[in-house]
Image: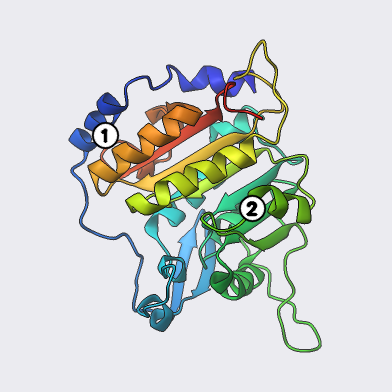
Amino acid sequence: MDDFFAKLGGEIVDVDEETFDLFSQCPSSQDLGMVDAAASLLELSVAGRDFEIAQSPGLLQSSRGGGTTGAAVWRSSVRLAEWLAWDRNPLFTTKALHSESTILELGSGISGLVPCILNSKVSKFIATDQAYVLKALRDNIAMNVTISSTSQKRKSSRTSDGNVKPAVNIDTVALDWENDDVTSVLSENNLKGGVDAVLACDCVYNYALIEPLVQTCAEICSVRSYSDEEPARSEKQTICVVAQQLRQPDVFEQWLQTFHRSFRVWRMPEELLSADLKAGSGFVVHIGILRLEVRR
């Protein structure tokens, strides 16, 4: 993991400066960032692979309590999936993540793009979201997952009752940041030893979710034991990867202030990003490592 951190450069020390720098490169976007909110079926090409993703426009437009943002496919997920599949992605070229890694995604939504892309690159992937999302998420994963990293999509296999079989190394788990006990959820899903990375893609879009999101990230990352001498270099340290579209500077700044209190934070350097995540794209990727004083 030393090689990975060496590539990141200097930590973020000034939240105001980071916010100003990012939003001066790219003005805040009024575009919500959905691929196509009205489509029931999306056909996408990601990292040379074709995906068919079912959406629920009706659910998205409903007044369901707790929100419906997970019912759509977001451009940030497409760009994150492209970057994770990129053959120069530093998480994999430095072996910070590898074929034996366990990854947990927060706020996965219905698309299943990230777990499908990483299915052949890691040992286990846990996609989490609120319970209302999970059936559509499972179906989209089962329809699009491949057993290898080739660009050819595996045809879905069905059980005798007509349901699609899930991918063997992808789990879907209900996790509500505001209401669920994170430790219990991890324990119930055989994750008492923690995970190698937490992914959060476009989970920062309003003030109300900032504290619960950061607290959930911190609780998951605190499971691993760390080295007191070199806390940011420990091989067991959980890496937190946060990708997001730059929309409202005030919301972003409050998230970063909150995240920075619990995590050491780096912005992913330009040269380590695929083209559609670079400066001016309107998207950004940050890396977090839980601060020593926050761990349990």
Q: Is residue 82 above or below residue 116?
A: above
Q: Is residue 266 above or below residue 228?
A: below
Q: CA distance from mark 1 to mark 2?
A: 34 Å
Q: Which residue is mark 2?
A: 181
Q: Quick check: can you spot residue 133?
A: yes
Q: Relative to 193, is 195 on the left or the right?
A: left
Under tag 1, what secondary structure?
Answer: helix
Instruction: Quadrant for the C terminus, please.
Output: top right
Residue 157: x and y, percent? 74, 77
Between residues 156 and 49, which one lies in front from this camera angle? 156
Residue 123: x and y, percent? 75, 47
* Mark identifier at residue 246: none
Q: Residue furthest bottom?
A: 161
Q: Quick check: can you spot residue 146?
A: no
Q: Residue at x 32, y 27 (%)?
A: 15
Under tag 2, what secondary structure?
Answer: loop
Amino acid bearing label 2: Asp
Q: Which residue is mark 1?
A: 22
Q: Relative to 83, is 156 on the left or the right?
A: right
